[in-house]
Amino acid sequence: MLLNQIKMIGLAAALTVFGSSVTAQTELLDAEQKDIANELIETALNSDLAYRIVESLTTEVGPRLAGSEAEKRAREWALKLGDELDFDQVSLEEFTMPFWDRGALHISLQAPYQQDLYGIALGGAGASKRNINAEVQYFRNLRELKQASEGELKGKIAFVDGDIMVKSQTGGGYSLANQRRRVGWQYAEQAGASALVVRSVGSDSHRFPHTGMMSKKDDSWSRIPVVAISNPDADHLRRLHRLGKTLKMSLHSESKWKGEVSSGNIIFDLIGRERPEEIVLIGAHLDSWDLGTGAVDDGAGVGIVSAAAALIATLPKRPKRTIRVVLFGAEEVGLLGAWDYAKKHADTLGNHVVATESDFGAQTIWRLSSNVNPAANGLIDEIAHLLAPIGIVRGGSEVPGGGPDILPLERQKVPTVRLQQNGMDYFDLHHTPDDTLDKINPKELAQNVAAYAAMVYLIADSDVQLRK
Amino acid sequence: MLLNQIKMIGLAAALTVFGSSVTAQTELLDAEQKDIANELIETALNSDLAYRIVESLTTEVGPRLAGSEAEKRAREWALKLGDELDFDQVSLEEFTMPFWDRGALHISLQAPYQQDLYGIALGGAGASKRNINAEVQYFRNLRELKQASEGELKGKIAFVDGDIMVKSQTGGGYSLANQRRRVGWQYAEQAGASALVVRSVGSDSHRFPHTGMMSKKDDSWSRIPVVAISNPDADHLRRLHRLGKTLKMSLHSESKWKGEVSSGNIIFDLIGRERPEEIVLIGAHLDSWDLGTGAVDDGAGVGIVSAAAALIATLPKRPKRTIRVVLFGAEEVGLLGAWDYAKKHADTLGNHVVATESDFGAQTIWRLSSNVNPAANGLIDEIAHLLAPIGIVRGGSEVPGGGPDILPLERQKVPTVRLQQNGMDYFDLHHTPDDTLDKINPKELAQNVAAYAAMVYLIADSDVQLRK
């Protein structure tokens, strides 16, 4: 653990002067609250706490696939982190889940010539019973595959091309591109294909394909292998196809489901001084895919929300409401920790004032969106105003939800806010071996913590009702 | 082949006006020569011929490891290219070479926890007879490894760290960093190590290690496996080492030498109209490493020198001297084609006026260096002056040599010139699977062709003696 020598900057001392400057306000935030929030921002911008948390998690635990022994070590690591950061309560809530194992994969072009392809099995995909050697049917996109008739692809490997994702600040385009990863297998299987290969969903030109979970159909997973190949590999196949070449591939995948295993959520609470039953939930997920060390997805989030709450914990008094950090388990494989949390806390969800998650990397936060009681928009406006100097603009409710793991809570009417990171580079790294610590810019990460710390403090110390 | 529909821009027609504007010059280049060179530049900047050559080579042949069946297909492709581009002579010169096969490699961290590492066997490395499971001895750099005493590393795997290469326009830093790849094995073997693992030599933060050839010692190759791991993997090991963790690795490599195979050089000649025996040699290499499709290294070079010569071939008359394009075989594994060329052409090397090679990617050319008869520097100065509008400055003889494959010719006193590409991104891609077509910017590639076409034409049409 890297954290035992952390020294909080003397926030408590600095804050003692504020009482005297408080004057009557018509705003929803009083002057002391604003001063404290500004002080949190400054402290956070000069702190490397979040970076050290991510460094510790990625170095000492490494990759941590949902349900694996490594994810268990991540939970042990997180329990120690909670103790070191001095939260009021630190707890573990375990649950069970089915374990999908990627297994070995070999995929190569066999015609017009032999060449290895850079592919990765998609989450939930089936195995090849034996080595598949087959002709490739090229589809320009998922729409074309959908038109394949039953049995048309018998004895063939379907390849669904697409396009390199356009980079954007919002990450827009992911959901649409992601359809070939999520549901492509259903059409390939229906048309009788022996396997499905898709252009992986990413905005980079590196040779690493992006993994990710597929979607179930009627509670079943694909029986055929489903493999994503890198953008340059897909470009290559497209060029060969356009030259009129017949493509053949060899493919062998040992992916399989391996029964029930344990996962769990970690909870850190800072108990509210006035209304402890009211919960401001800030989440991130502890698991990662197995390929990188999950620095950007979602070590960064773990660092950001833990550090933000830890900075608030150094204030002389607790905010009025409880701040709850939830480090979800098994996010990547279907939000399993999130669903478990919603189930186990069903009777207190009515007291969840707001929920949010940091799960979009660590580039600079540029927008604060919200979906709260319209009567509470004034509070969010004031918070956005306070965050403007660190480059954050006020958004509306254009971003659906508080983050992936917040979805089950939203369904139970928990309001959400969202601090949106600049996603320009996110899909270069997302779900690839390249998701490693060096991709995080410590200065940008610190800006994230500043925004979270100020926002979470202000909501937690407010009397405004955010629930509709 | 993509080239059969290529239409040369009507250079011949455009040039007929020049005769009348020629006036007496005190310079070494006359007005007609300058006009033709400028016209070549403009034509090249608007031509996609080089890009289409690289696209064809990388798509229709793919990766082409020295001595492989794929390199043989590359030679067949090149012979066709030479015919299509209408050179005066197209020839193949075969030679034999020992074949090193990378084989399968598995390398993983076993302590403090299990994690796959991204490694690649280095060229010429030995195999592990069985799976090696051993403690890792960490060395901060090659200098530290050199101090290991005989037998000190018995039963251990040596890991030689280093630093991520600093990006630079010149690619400076490569030769030094490369020492751990080239000769590290000699010290590891001497100290009794079971295997050597080195931080790979590259300026990127991607998870792909860079391969490359090692150096022989007393005509022998390493008996132990030698593996390069990616920069992020090396960072990871360094952090763990600094935390005081004991590192263990598991490593299995099946690399081996597989006997004699064929390789060859391809030669395209444009026969000089006045002094055909005088040769201006421009080279590139046809082989690539097996990981990428060798677009940047050295498909780009093949495209640049072939297209430059092909543009000159469309002029109404041949330059005075012969222009010879040599597409060398087996460069990556020890300049084998280059040595074979020097041997086979030993009796005409005295007629090689100058030699140069394009083997540093396809980013913009920024400098023209030379190592010619000082009396001929005026000619190079005038050429540089003519290339200034496309961003090229005059260098001196600070860059040793004309390119890797030109080394054997330099040893025989052939003068050299060098058009230096901006190498800022070169070592991000060099010898990795990421060396694919998408990394080439067609506009920058066209600038390369423009510079080569103008320079080569002017030297070939000159009466200036470049030999010392």
Image: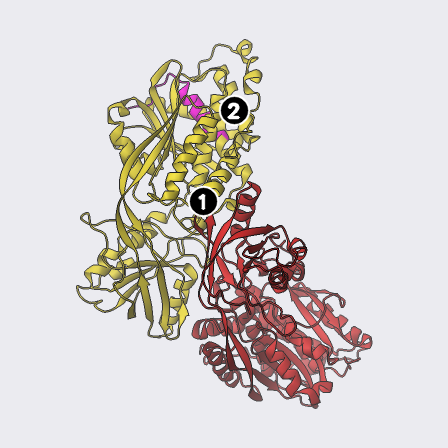
Chain colours: A red, B yellow
Q: Quadrant of the N terminus of chain A?
A: bottom left
Residue at left 69%, top 68%?
A387
Q: Which residues are magenta?
A: B450-468
**Residue B423 locus on image (x, y percent):** 44, 44
Res. A90 mark: none
Please state if A435 lies on the left or on the right of B274 as rendered. Answer: right
Rounded to the nearest whole Å, what is the CA distance between mark 1 and mark 2? 30 Å
From the image, tell me which residue sits under label 1.
B62
**In-front residue for pair A106/B14:** A106
Residue A26, quarter of the rendered image: bottom right
Disc 1 to disc 2: CB gap under 8 Å: no
Location of mark 2 (residue) = B40
| Above or below: residue B152 compared with residue A274 | above
Going from the N terminus, do you reach mark 1 or mark 2 first?
A: 2
Q: Give yes or no for residue B458 being in the magenta stretch.
A: yes
Residue B468 screen position, x and y as percent: 28, 24
Q: Quadrant of the C terminus of chain A?
A: bottom right
Regarding residue A37, the answer to whether it shows in the image is no
Q: Is residue A152 magenta?
A: no
Residue B208 in percent (x, y) is at 43, 57
Determine the residue positioned at 35% across, 60% down: B105
Q: Amino acid at mark 2?
A: Leu
Amino acid at pointer 1: Gly
Give the chain letter at badge 2: B
Q: What residue is drawn where x is 77% and y is 75%?
A: A372
Q: Secondary structure at mark 1?
A: loop
Chain to which the residue tagged by mark 1 belongs: B
**Dot 2: element:** helix
Q: Residues within 10 Å of mark 1 (few under 14, many from 20)?
A: many
